[in-house]
Image (cartoon, grey):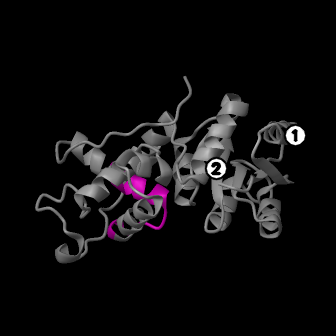
Amino acid sequence: MKHPIRVLVADDNHVVRLGLEQLLHSISGVELVGAAADGAEAVEMAQACQPDICLLDVRMPVMNGIEAARRLSDEHKVVMLTHSEDSENVTAAIDAGAHGYMIYHEIDVDYLHQSLMSVIGGGMLVSATASTALMARAASAPAAPAVELANQGRSESGDTLGLSRREVEVMDLMAEGLNNRAIAQTFFLSEKTVKNHVNRIFTKLDAATRAEAVSIWLRRAHAADAGTGPSVPMQVWARN
């Protein structure tokens, strides 16, 4: 990314917000473009300053972070900030288009920088708790909409959810949190080629976002655990 990563922060706790601002100011290649005290203010600010990433506290007055994420995620990448991961909030945030969760007590300069770079590259921040919540949602969610076999190239067993061999490989790495650049380097492909694969995956899985595609793919992994299909490896973002 040639220009600085433009970041908007929203947290109703003044002290916490100042701490985040100081961390962001200390990171090279990152520009803090706004700091809001609630979700409604974050939405208004985002329209004016056009951030690349919005860091939103889950619990805020006027408008909470999840509702703000729902309004912002179509045009901006969103990461939720929280003191503890609640499975219901994880699920709601992912449904709202968030690219993941960051736990306040885990945030330092290096981790924040790495996380921002991953998200701007298309990756997801999926911690152990968040992945458990996604698996639980996948287990209870209805199956992905069926499409014509001729169009999807679905295997007879349905194990690949209609994806080609290469698309399965790309989807596996997406589920591990890799962005398009990292996937391209893994397979010695151009980023444009990987992006084309990702777009086809979205179409075949009827997914609008990377988060939704990963959720559908994890449903396949859950089915494997139940003995109805092969497993899919997943690497979660968790600090040692």
Q: Position of residue 190 (x, y in %)?
A: 43, 58
| Magenta highlight on residue 85 | no
Residue at horizontal 29 percent and vertical 54 percent from the top? 168
Indicate the amino acid at tag 2. Answer: Val
Q: Nearer the viewer, residue 49 or 89?
A: 49
**Above-or-below relation of 44 to 186:** below
- Residue 62 lies left or right of residue 200; in this view the side is right
Mark 1 or mark 2, earlier in chain: 1
Residue, disc 1:
18
Dot 2: element: strand
Residue at horizontal 80 percent and vertical 53 percent from the top? 61
Magenta segment boundaries in residue numbering? 204-218
Indicate the amino acid at tag 1. Answer: Leu
Taking the image as drawn, is residue 107 in sight?
no
- Residue 74 lies left or right of residue 129; in this view the side is right
Residue at horizontal 83 percent and vertical 69 percent from the top? 48
- Residue 2 lies left or right of residue 99; in this view the side is right
Q: Which quadrant would residue 230 be assigned to in this image?
A: top left
Dot 1: element: helix
Residue at horizontal 68 percent and vertical 48 percent from the top? 58
Q: Which mark is residue 151?
A: none
Whether label 1 touches label 2, CB < 8 Å: no
Q: How many marks?
A: 2
| Magenta highlight on residue 212 | yes
The N terminus sits in image quarter: bottom right
Label 1: few (<14), some or many (≥20) within 10 Å? some
Q: Which mark is residue 79?
A: 2
Q: Main secondary structure of the magenta part?
A: helix
Q: Position of residue 99 (x, y in %)?
A: 57, 52
Q: Nearer the viewer, residue 118 or 1?
A: 1
